[in-house]
Amino acid sequence: MNIEIEEESKYLTVDITDKDTGAKVLMSHGSGIDADWHCDDKGSYWRCDNSYHCMDDGGFYVGWQDFYVTIPKKKIEDFKLHFTGGQYLANKYMLRDYLEDTIAMALVELDEEAKKKR
């Protein structure tokens, strides 16, 4: 898959496009992923940074958990999630599974759209 990442901070989204087929997907925003996505081309992979806005049981925001995702260009399903600035909030609110599932769904959607257009 030959993908390209385009940032559009005005709309707080990152478009990921398969350049061979034109299939496109938006990286997740909302439901806690409330900051802007920032992506950098690192050669063989992209690094996409964001933050999760943590909320307690009372509905009050309690802080931000920063994270980044590395997405290999040759096999996007092998992405890796990394937490930065400590992992207290990530562990307390069990963010790893949620974020990995959310990001995987966006990347699977891209793959399915690309297959339809081939």
Image (spheres, rainbow, N blue to C red):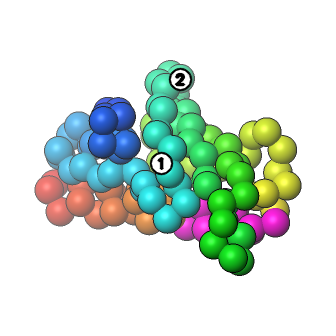
Q: Quadrant of residue 7?
A: top left
Residue type, mark 2 in image = Lys
| Residue 47 drawn above or below residue 89 | above
Residue 88: image location, x then y, percent: 85, 55
Q: Residue at x 51, y 44 (%)?
A: 35
Residue 108: image location, x then y, percent: 40, 62
Query: Which badge, 2 or 1, comes first in the chain's sequence?
Result: 2
The residue closer to the viewer here, 59 or 65, is: 59
Q: Is residue 76 magenta?
A: no
Secondary structure mostly taken by the magenta-highlighted segment of the chain: helix
Q: Residue at x 37, y 43 (%)?
A: 12
Q: Residues within 10 Å of mark 1 (few under 14, many from 20)?
A: some
Q: Residue at x 18, y 46 (%)?
A: 21
| Residue 78 drawn above or below residue 41 | below
Lateral position of residue 60 relative to residue 26, left or right: right
Q: Is residue 95 magenta?
A: yes
Task: Give, as a single range, the part of the protein colored magenta.
Answer: 92-101
Residue 76: image location, x then y, percent: 47, 48
Residue type, mark 1 in image = Ile
Question: Is residue 89 among the parts visible in the rendering?
Answer: yes
Lateral position of residue 61 relative to residue 1, left or right: right
Image mark for residue 6: none
The residue closer to the viewer here, 7 or 10, is: 10
Lateral position of residue 17 relative to residue 36, left or right: left
According to the picture, the residue beneath numbered tag 2 turns out to be 42
According to the picture, the residue beneath numbered tag 1 turns out to be 76
